[in-house]
Image (spheres, helix red, strand yellow):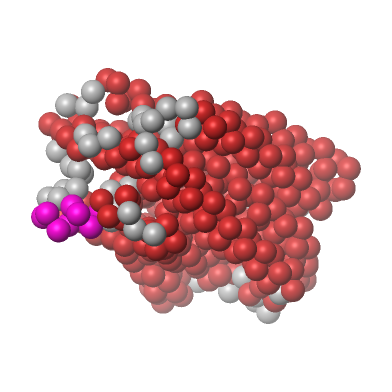
Amino acid sequence: MAKETYDKKELFESMPIPKALATLAIPTIISQMINVIYNMVDTFFIGRTGNSYMLAATTLTMTMTFLCVAFSNLFGLGGGSLVARLLGAQRPDEAKSVSAFSIYGAIAISIVYSALIAIFMDPVLVFLGASPDTIGFTRQYTVYVVVIGTVFTTLSITMAHLLRNTGNASKASIGLSGGGILNMFLDPLFMFVILPKGQEVVGAAIATLLSNICSFIYLFIQVVKASRTAPLSFRLSDARKVKKDNVKKLFAVGVPSALLSAFFDVANICANQLAAAHSDVTLAALGIVMKIERIPNGVNVGIGQGMLPIVAYNYASGNHKRMREAIKVTRIIGLITCAICICLLEIFAKPITNFFLSTRGGDPSLAIATVTVASVFLRMRCTASPFMFLSYSNSYIMQATGHGGATLLHAFAREVIFYIPCLFLLDRVMGQNGLAAALPVGECFGAIVGLVLVHYILKKAEQKKSGI
């Protein structure tokens, strides 16, 4: 036990920053990439049918599944960042009660969300942009992945955040990645072998649900094992011991983090509605591109989440020199990664989008039109990657240092003040291509706001020795 504890302290306190960041970020990036692939799997196999309406349906359900990420951020990032700060302040018992409270909070909010979607499913789907041609497929996917699966998805991500922020990044990565890998095998099995033709969306949904359940089981076991040496707990009695002050600190970071995802979700709803107003082809094309662009975004999120516990721990312990070094190294690596991704996506936009939708099955002319629009969208939207990285990393810095108000302000400015208005304005000015142009324009302004806020926070941090 002593060796285990020492290793974790060395990771946060004295290990060279590039090595410490790699230790925490590489498993997270791998997890993100596998989950990106796992989210692409449904799109890929449904695309083998050549049915653009099925693809449009999965685009619409993406909006609802993103809310699960918001719930996970509420308790996973809010609780996880506080756990890391409490560890830096040498208060492990409080960290343990916060972890238990986070888990039971995630359970409660997931059950409420699932019940509401089950009751109001059709009105919600119509609001999101479902047409008579897509609503049936959308309903099929929603029942399994959202109504039944939200609890497993939300808890898995929440537990992964808690494991990562206590130095157990590899276990978090294996749990989330394992579900993604399993889904790659289950998708074709349920879509093309077990279920009859025409039920491909149902098959994809069942495969996703089973994969998420397996991730949940693995991560539950790992949290129980890690709780022997790390401040993690599933006990309701520990959750009840949480201090009111720590609950406030959890929500001070968790609520803005959740709202960041929720604002992102609202922006996607607006984009989907505008795309659906053009045609189902535009909606399907946008859905393909949103899946593809998750590759650079997934890497960026993984780098940022690897940085978060290092920044949080050293902010709380008062080692601001190490905190600043972690931020600097993270920014350099992230921006280089973005530059490489932009080059690749600009060069190979057409074959990449064509990979996700067969032009030989279903209606070939409809499929070709979808791929053509998607390749144009991809070339335009991928240029937003460096701005999105800066926004993600700045948001994680604010969360790590407990500045929930700044996180909320940044999230609101990024999505509500800049991106969403750009969507409507550029859609009117440029037509459907404006939906793609709005992302780099809006994200550029959002990144500037984030940089200003973080500069102010770091400058203020120098004036005090430590804090949580």
Where is residue 366 drawn, in percent x and y? Answer: 74, 67
Q: What is the quadrant of the N terminus in the image?
A: bottom left
As displayed, is residue 438 above or below residue 170? Answer: above
Residue extending farthest to the right is 429
Where is residue 9 drawn, in percent x and y? Answer: 25, 51
**Residue positioned 60% across, 51% down in the render:** 389
**Residue positioned 18% across, 52% down in the render:** 5
346 or 458, which lies in front? Answer: 458
**Residue positioned 42% across, 27% down in the render:** 464
As displayed, is residue 433 above or below residue 348? Answer: above
218 or 147, which lies in front? Answer: 218
25 or 198, which lies in front? Answer: 25
Q: Main secondary structure of the magenta part?
A: helix
As displayed, is residue 316 above or below residue 25? Answer: above
**Residue positioned 64% across, 35% down in the render:** 452
Tell me if 220 is positioned left or right of 176 in this view: left
Q: Which residues are magenta?
A: 1-8
Residue extending farthest to the bottom is 360
Residue 184 in magenta? no
Tell me if 313 is positioned left or right of 35 in this view: left
The answer to whether residue 343 shows anywhere in this view is yes
Tell me if 104 is positioned left or right of 299 in this view: left
Quadrant of residue 100 within the rendered picture: top left
Q: What is the quadrant of the C terminus in the image?
A: top left
2 or 173, which lies in front? Answer: 2
Where is residue 372 drawn, in percent x and y? Answer: 78, 67
Where is residue 220 drawn, in percent x and y? Answer: 22, 52
